[in-house]
Amino acid sequence: MTTSTSTKKLAGKVAVITGGNSGMGLATARRFVAEGAYVFITGRREKELDAAVREIGSNVTGVQGDVANLADLDRLYETVKKQKGRIDVLFANAGVGEWVGIDSVTEEHFDKIMGVNVKGTLFTVQKALPLLTKGGSIIMTGSIAGSKGFQNFSVYNASKAAIRSFARSLTSDLKGRNIRVNVLSPGPIDTPILGPVPKETIAAIVSSVPMGRIGESDEIAKVAVFLASDDSSYVSGIELFVDGGLAQV
């Protein structure tokens, strides 16, 4: 994944990626660095985060933390401020999911999913604003689940619908600063988040994908580069599905 200096789409940009220690976040961090960006990545698990930093190799800083913990977010942005002084691209990617039937939803389950996916995403964006440059790009990870009614996934589905709503509101809120806000919504992607999901459930979902296969993390990363770069300079407020057509037909 090499790109000549003259054609690097994110040359000189400073990016922050939450949940950048694995899966789609890690793949995106690799892509961003290859395209010329300096990247700050976060993750809750220190060991996994350190491994991700070693894998990326250069132009990367890892900051351990949980996006649902506002003190951790403050520490993240203090680190960014000290090292680089600004943010050009924010990828609010961290998220969690659990398959729980409606009869089994507990307050703990609700608070966990909403705490990371909704509260965490909102404050990841809000607390970044003092550092975000005019003309910057905010990308939030949604999901086809925000548009579908997946069984036994009601709280997660609702949390991702909230992300879509945030993008609309934030596009209006930040238009005066020329900051673009978009949602990148994956379909079924081969990432660690699928680990606990029953194989028959995954098979059923994949069988419904018009392209007939599960997606790869790097396919998300390539779309994130588009939304982060000037290639999408007139794109704001959208939800861009990367789902093999699953939510579209």
Image (cartoon, grey):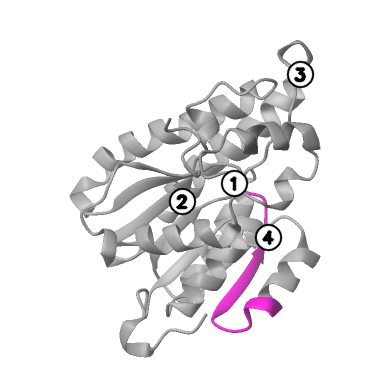
Element at label 4: loop
Question: Residue 212, percent across and down?
Answer: 58, 43
What percent of the width, then of the height, locates residue 59?
A: 54, 81
The residue carrying mark 1 is 70
Q: Amino acid at mark 1?
A: Leu
Query: First in sequence: mark 4 or mark 3?
Result: 4
- Which circle, 1 or 3, is nearer the viewer? 3
Determine crowd level at label 4: few under 14, some 14-19, many 20+ residues with C-alpha closer than 10 A.
many
Residue at 55% x, 68% y is 29
Task: Report which quarter residue 50 is drawn in.
Answer: bottom right
What distance separates the C-alpha of mark 4 from that of mark 3? 27 Å
Instruction: Please give left or right for residue 151 compared with residue 233 in the image.
Output: right
- Looking at the rendered structure, the kind of residue marked 3 is Thr
**How many angstroms separate mark 2 from mark 1 (CA)?**
9 Å
Q: Which residue is mark 2?
A: 127
Check contact, mark 2 vs mark 1: CB within 8 A. Answer: yes
Estimate how packed mark 1 is, as few (under 14), some (14 to 19) or many (20 or more) residues with alpha carbons within 10 Å: some
CA–CA distance between discs 1 and 3?
Answer: 23 Å
Which label number is shown at residue 106?
A: 3
From the top left corner, tell me how far across and down residue 179 is, in percent.
28, 54
Disc 4 or disc 3, which is closer to the eye?
4
Q: Which residues are magenta?
A: 54-67
Q: Residue furthest bottom?
A: 5
Indicate yes or no whether the magenta region holds residue 184: no
- Asked whether the beta carbons under mark 4 and mark 3 sit within 8 Å of each other, the answer is no
Callout 3: few (<14), some (14-19), or many (20+) C-alpha neighbours within 10 Å? Answer: few
The answer to whether 36 is drawn above or below residue 223 in the figure is below
In the displayed structure, 160 sits above or below 77; it is: above
Tag on residue 79? Answer: none
Location of mark 4 (residue) = 22
Q: Quadrant of residue 103?
A: top right
